[in-house]
Amino acid sequence: MSLSKCACIDTLYTELPWVERFQAAKDDGFEAVEFWDWRIRDLNDTRKAAQAAGISISGFNGDADYSLVDPDHKQAYLDFLKQSIAAAKQVGAASVTIHSNALGDAGIVVDHYDNLSHTVKLCSMYDTLLECAKLAEEEEISLNLEALNITTDHVGNFLTTTQMGAEICRLINSPRLKILYDVYHMQLNEGSLCDNISKYCDQFGHIHVADAPGRHEPGTGEISYQKVIRHLESCGYTGRIGYELFPADGTESAVKAIMKNS
């Protein structure tokens, strides 16, 4: 079986104008695209470009300035998520990605919430996710909760392990709330990639790929991506593989590496 490939067009094809990236990704063999901040994009042009290219939009980030771990953010978080879901429906996207903490420029964690205890952060995240899941079910949109690395890119992020994300999703038990398993982030935070895939694959809604270290294409770092992807398949994963990576030497060479190592 060959899992569907999804290109993050905020990191790939950046040499092209926005609306040209959809056709370029389609021509290279990607089944879908994803991106980060919907607020900075013309949604009508985005929808039209995807439709013209015959490529799906997998999703984008949906939480922006608000954090699941801050109990004072609960209503604002839900209000903004409603806007993100509406944007997803406008462009025909299947999912929205969410995080424990608000992210600023370059993915910097805006607030580490050192004033809040671990208990408050965890309970707040669970409480707000319960409402997020209800909303997602009502709107028939999928939510993917992503853990991030705290060694390199997102110092101060609360959700850092596959176990925490997967166990929260299991407890909430909504078909519309899963985790986004980012192989790059989890290699940096916890390793044991195949073991964790075996334990928690039933909760995976989407996969992100980049090699480590460097966050470049497969083959540039230490992760055996052919092994990882085959293991995902053997564990029953049937979703998309999202290539959210920064090309080491341009999009063309990165795409060749992606196709070779998947």
Image: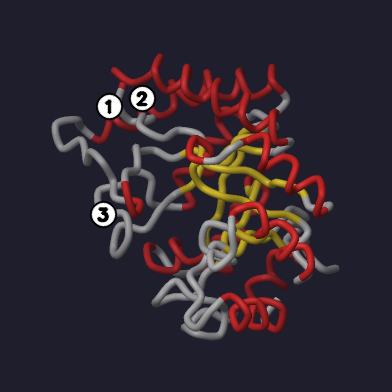
Measuring from the top left, give residue 225's x and y in whole percent: 61, 77
Q: Give the residue displayed 39% in from the left and 77% down from the top.
A: 213
Are the two marked residues, 2 and 1, in contact with CB atoms closer than 8 angstroms?
yes
Q: Quadrant of residue 253?
A: bottom right
Q: Which residue is mark 1?
A: 120
Q: The disc labelled 3 sits on which kind of residue? A: Val
Tell me if mark 1 has few (under 14), some (14-19) or many (20+) residues whose alpha carbon lies within 10 angstroms of its own.
Answer: some
Q: The disc labelled 1 sits on which kind of residue? A: Val
Q: Secondary structure at mark 2?
A: helix
Q: Is residue 148 above or below residue 110?
A: below
Q: Secondary structure at mark 1?
A: helix
Task: State the separation of the CA atoms marked 3 and 2.
Answer: 20 Å
- Say whether residue 236 is left or right of residue 167: right
Q: Which residue is mark 2?
A: 124
Q: Is residue 159 above or below residue 211?
A: above
| Numbered badge on residue 155 | 3
Q: The disc labelled 2 sits on which kind of residue? A: Ser
- Can residue 167 be seen here? The reply is no
